[in-house]
Image: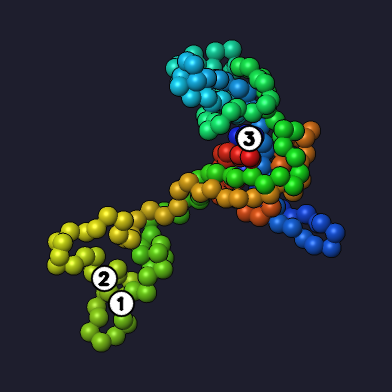
Amino acid sequence: MKFIIGKKVGMTQIYEGDKIVPVTVVEAGPCLVSQIKSKDTDGYESWQLAFGKTKHIARPQKGHLKNLGDLAHMKEFRFKQSPPEKKLSIGDTIDASWFSEGEEVKVAGLSKGRGFMGVVKRHGFSGGPASHGQKHQHRAPGSIGGGFPERVTKGRRMAGRSGSEKNIIKSEIVKIDKDNNLIAFKGALPGRRGTILTIVSK
């Protein structure tokens, strides 16, 4: 199992022979190991990575990071089986060189926030008829429940804020620039430029 925290840079395209491949470029690391948990002391095994610099940091976080510096993003990666063969200690660095081209990975991040939307745009509802006595109901959701059980069921699709949800996408590493810690993934990844992504490979 391999993992790293990265920041989305943007999309571009590269050539593979006579084919154009759309790719998303991610600045993957360098990440510092900020905590290591073991079964003996914590009941489970995990590594915590820290990534990105920040000027403003809370005191508890500053105390947790100790001598590692003011780092912005931390993420814990738990191991269901045994931890990776790579032996690390607190303060060691993980960068893009841990991965290899052609490797299949899962990339998780928040999708773009799209603001408040009605049911037609958010869920693809048809809306009401445009004639035959309708008044101001062209984009309304219609009935949201029956006479029984006299309540609105959980999970009912209604108007509300769209986007800003965690998405996990399977992707493939097309190219790695180890000098600049850049990884190019095939296709699109969640979020806007600057979105923090977690990359996990088996």
Identify the residue position indicated by label 2 in the image: 142
Mark 2 or mark 1, earlier in chain: 1
Q: Which mark is residue 128?
A: 1
Q: Is residue 12 left or right of residue 69?
A: right
Hey, which quadrant is residue 54 in on the image? top right
Most distant residue in the bottom direction: 132
Q: Which mark is residue 77?
A: none
Q: How many marks?
A: 3
At x 54% / y 26%, what residue is drawn?
46
Q: CA distance from mark 3 to mark 1?
A: 51 Å
Q: CA distance from mark 2 to mark 3?
A: 48 Å
At x 61% / y 17%, what residue is drawn?
90
Mark 3 or mark 1, earlier in chain: 3
In this orientation, which residue lies closer to the viewer: 17 or 99?
99
Hey, which quadrant is residue 162 in on the image? bottom left
At x 61% / y 39%, what residue is drawn?
200
Q: Amino acid type of disc 2?
A: Gly
Seen in the picture, residue 140 relative to 4 is either above or below; the reply is below
Q: CA distance from mark 2 to mark 1?
A: 7 Å
At x 66% / y 42%, what residue is drawn?
26
Q: Position of residue 154 (x, y in %)?
A: 27, 55
Q: Are marks 2 and 1 in contact (CB under 8 Å)?
A: yes
Identify the residue position indicated by label 3 in the image: 1
